[in-house]
């Protein structure tokens, strides 16, 4: 029996995916259909670069639409404010102390929401995988391309 893998995400990430899907379906899809029609009107399709580019873009849009619809259908929206405890779980904001005693804060999010520039890391990233399930006070070792890094979990918040 096949199991369906759920896709955890925060409400903000879900809203972004819904808006992206809407934009693709309501704006970009009609634009590319119009571009194909205009290119067809130019005649010979075998050497029509505009037509081939528009058809390629149409394929990309359809692929994105399929991917987004699939992720949204399997989405589990997690509200971190409903969680509690001292373990790192999806949606938690984790305050770390690195090996140089530098304080670092990350929120554990889904792959589509991850953005290191705003301190949001995927639960599937090396650091995210190392943190999930750990408790406040535990030390965590993370293998990175630049070598092993060590962190201590100072606190966990659910905001």
Image: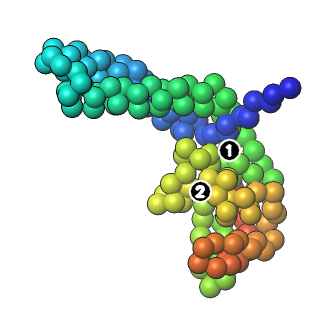
Against 21, residue 130 (above or below) is below
Can you name the residue that lies furthest to the right here?
1
Against 81, residue 97 (above or below) is below
Badge nearest the viewer, 1 or 2 = 2
Q: Marks 1/2: CA distance?
A: 15 Å
Can residue 155 be seen here? The reply is yes
Quarter of the image holding residue 137?
bottom right
- Asked if residue 47 lies left or right of residue 98, the reply is left
Where does residue 150 sit, x and y in percent of width and height?
Answer: 70, 77
Q: Residue at 80%, 30% (x, y): give it.
A: 3
- In the rendered image, the quadrant that contains the N terminus is top right
Q: Residue at 22%, 21% (x, y): give it.
A: 45
Q: Nearer the viewer, residue 102 or 37?
A: 37
Can you name the residue that lies furthest to the bottom here?
100
Residue where numbered disc 2 is placed:
121
Query: Which type of secondary structure does the marked residue at label 1 adopt?
Result: helix
Q: Nearer the viewer, residue 32 or 87?
A: 32
Q: Residue at 54%, 46% (x, y): give it.
A: 113
Query: Which type of secondary structure does the marked residue at label 2 adopt?
Result: strand
Ranked by sequence position, the earlier of labels 1 and 2 is 1
For mark 2, does the 10 Å Cα neighbourhood hold few (<14), some (14 to 19), or many (20 or more) residues? many
Colour scheme of the picture:
rainbow
The mark found on residue 80 in the picture is 1
């Amino acid at each position: 029996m096949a199991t369906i893998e759920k896709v955890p995400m925060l409400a903000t990430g879900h809203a972004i995916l819904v808006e992206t899907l809407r934009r693709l379906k309501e704006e970009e899809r009609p634009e590319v259909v119009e571009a194909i029609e205009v290119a067809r009107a130019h005649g010979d399709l075998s050497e029509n670069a505009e037509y081939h580019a528009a058809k390629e873009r149409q394929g990309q849009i359809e692929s994105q639409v399929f991917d987004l619809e699939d992720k949204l259908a399997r989405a589990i929206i997690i509200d971190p404010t409903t969680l509690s405890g001292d373990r790192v779980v999806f949606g938690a904001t984790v305050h770390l102390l690195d090996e140089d005693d530098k304080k670092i804060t990350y929120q554990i999010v889904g792959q589509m929401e991850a953005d290191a520039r705003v301190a949001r890391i995927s639960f599937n990233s090396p650091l995210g995988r190392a943190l999930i399930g750990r408790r406040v006070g535990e030390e965590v070792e993370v293998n990175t391309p630049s070598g092993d890094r060590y962190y201590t979990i100072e606190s966990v918040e659910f905001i």
